[in-house]
Image (tube, rainbow, N blue to C red):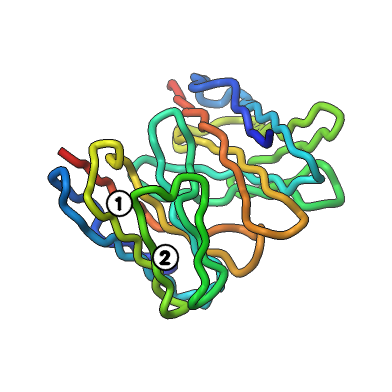
C-alpha cells in the first residue's frame, strides 16, 4: 500500500540549531516528492519538490531535502533554524505516471525555543 | 494575485444541516482539489477535478458532493452534516498533474 510516514509528531529545537525532519514513503513507482509548510491559521505552502535529477534539492526559506531511493526517504533539513520557522511541516508523495493521487504525511509540528 | 480563496473561514453547523463551502481560484488552473485536515491525520483528499465539468472521488468522499461548472469555481457541498465532518477544509489548485498545489487558507467547520 502507498503511504507516507513522518515519524516525529513534534520536534523542538533551539533557535540557531540545525533541523532535520524525517519522511519515509512506500510507493510502487518512482515518486514525485514534496515538502509543504503550514503556519498557524494558514493554508499549505510549498517549500520544495523533487521530480528527477539531482537528489539534493533546494527550497525556499533556506530549506533543503535529499531524496534517497535506497532508503525511501526524503528528509528535510535546515542548517540554522529561526523562530519564524515554527510551523507544521508535511511531506507528500505523488506518482509520476499520471493521475492525481498525492498522499500527505500526518505532519511534524516544529517548535523553536529561544 | 488572490490565488485560491475560500469562504467562509469559520462555520458552526447543527447536525443534519447542509452548507456549501466556496472555493475560487484566479490562476486559470485546470486541477482543483478539496482536502480535509484532522489532527494527526494529515490531509485526506475528498474530491478533485481535472477541468470544468469533470470531477472524481478522492479518498474520503462520503457525505460530500462537488461540482465544477467553471474553471474558477469548485464548491464543496455537505448534505446532512454529521459530527464526523468537523474538520478543517482546504481547497487547492494546480496547473497540472502532480505539480505544485496552491492552497486556500482553509475553512474551520464544527458540527454540533
Disc 1 and disc 2 in contact, CB within 8 angstroms: no
Identify the image quadrant of residue A57.
top right
Drawn side of residue A55 relative to residue B52, left or right = right
Q: Of residues B103 and B65, which is closer to you in this image?
A: B65
Secondary structure at numbered mark 2: strand
The quadrant in which residue B67 appears is: bottom left
| Residue at (33, 44) in percent of width and height | B88
Q: Residue at x 56, y 45 (%)?
A: A36
- Give me the chain letter of mark 1: B
Where does residue A15 sit, x and y in percent of width and height? Answer: 51, 25
Residue B1 found in image quarter:
bottom left
Mark whose residue sits in front, 1 or 2: 1
The reply, left or right, for residue B64 in relation to residue A73 is left
Q: Mark 2 = which residue?
A: B4
Residue occupied by mark 1: B107
Residue in the image at 65% along x and 48% along y:
A48
Vertical relation: B45 (above or below) B29:
above
Q: How many marks?
A: 2
Whether residue B101 is situated above or below residue A67 in the rendered picture: below
Left or right, residue B62 beside residue B96: left
Amino acid at each position: 500500500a502507498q503511504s507516507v510516514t513522518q515519524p516525529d509528531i513534534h520536534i523542538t529545537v533551539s533557535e540557531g540549531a540545525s533541523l532535520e525532519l524525517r519522511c519515509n514513503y512506500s510507493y510502487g513507482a518512482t515518486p514525485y516528492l514534496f515538502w509543504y509548510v503550514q503556519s498557524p491559521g494558514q493554508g499549505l505552502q510549498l517549500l520544495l519538490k523533487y521530480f528527477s535529477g539531482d537528489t539534493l534539492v533546494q527550497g525556499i526559506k533556506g530549506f533543503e531535502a535529499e531524496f534517497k531511493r535506497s532508503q525511501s526517504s526524503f528528509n528535510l533539513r535546515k542548517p540554522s533554524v529561526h523562530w519564524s520557522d515554527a510551523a507544521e511541516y508535511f511531506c507528500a508523495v505523488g506518482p509520476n505516471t499520471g493521475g492525481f493521487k498525492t498522499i500527505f504525511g500526518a505532519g511534524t509540528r516544529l517548535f523553536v525555543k529561544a | 494575485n488572490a490565488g485560491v480563496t475560500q469562504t467562509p473561514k469559520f462555520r458552526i453547523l447543527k447536525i443534519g444541516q447542509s452548507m456549501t463551502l466556496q472555493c475560487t481560484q484566479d490562476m486559470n488552473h485546470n486541477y482543483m482539489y478539496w482536502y480535509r485536515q484532522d489532527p494527526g491525520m494529515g490531509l485526506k483528499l475528498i474530491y478533485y477535478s481535472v477541468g470544468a465539468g469533470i470531477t472524481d472521488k478522492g479518498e474520503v468522499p462520503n457525505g460530500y458532493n462537488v461540482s465544477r461548472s467553471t474553471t474558477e469555481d469548485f464548491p464543496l457541498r455537505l448534505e446532512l452534516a454529521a459530527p464526523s465532518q468537523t474538520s478543517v477544509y482546504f481547497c487547492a489548485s494546480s496547473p497540472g498533474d502532480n505539480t505544485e498545489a496552491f492552497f486556500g487558507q482553509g475553512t474551520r467547520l464544527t458540527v454540533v
